[in-house]
Image: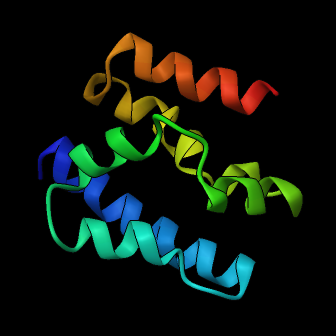
Amino acid sequence: MTTEILFDQRIRRLIVEETEALGKRPSYLENTINKGDVLAVVKKVIQKESSTYKKLVDIGRKDLTLESVILEPEWKDLFEAEELEICRARLEK
């Protein structure tokens, strides 16, 4: 399997994990990735802090954010340095 396919699967698992933690589905992300390329959608979503990100931070679950997943070592080649820095900086707040 390609790294992009594995990333797609990881993001879909993340949605399940976020749903369990928040008690509701991250509908924007889920609806958007079901319509197109997961990697392109994730790159767009991380450009600004999402409401799901804020909710996860509020309950102490930064580990379930897109930003946290993007920084997992196996995905680093899928993202530009600037995108990785956005994620790093946001998680360090």
Q: Nearer the viewer, residue 38 or 74?
A: 38
- The answer to whether residue 34 is left or right of residue 83 is left
Q: Residue at x 26, y 66 (%)?
A: 33
Q: Quadrant of the C terminus?
A: top right
Q: Residue at x 38, y 34 (%)?
A: 74
- The answer to whether residue 70 is left or right of residue 50 is left
Residue ranking furthest to the top? 81
Residue 60 locus on image (x, y percent): 87, 56
Figure colour scheme: rainbow
Q: Residue at x 80, y 53 (%)?
A: 57
Q: How many marks on residues?
A: 0
Residue 41 locus on image (x, y percent): 28, 51
Q: Nearer the viewer, residue 56 or 16?
A: 56
Residue 38 lies in quadrant: bottom left
Residue ranking furthest to the right? 59
Residue 58 locus on image (x, y percent): 87, 58
Task: Establish if 22 lies above or below 56.
Answer: below
Residue 40 locus on image (x, y percent): 22, 44
Residue 49 lies in quadrant: top right
Q: Residue at x 71, y 88 (%)?
A: 23
Task: Establish if 23 lies above or below 21.
Answer: below
Residue 78 lies in quadrant: top left
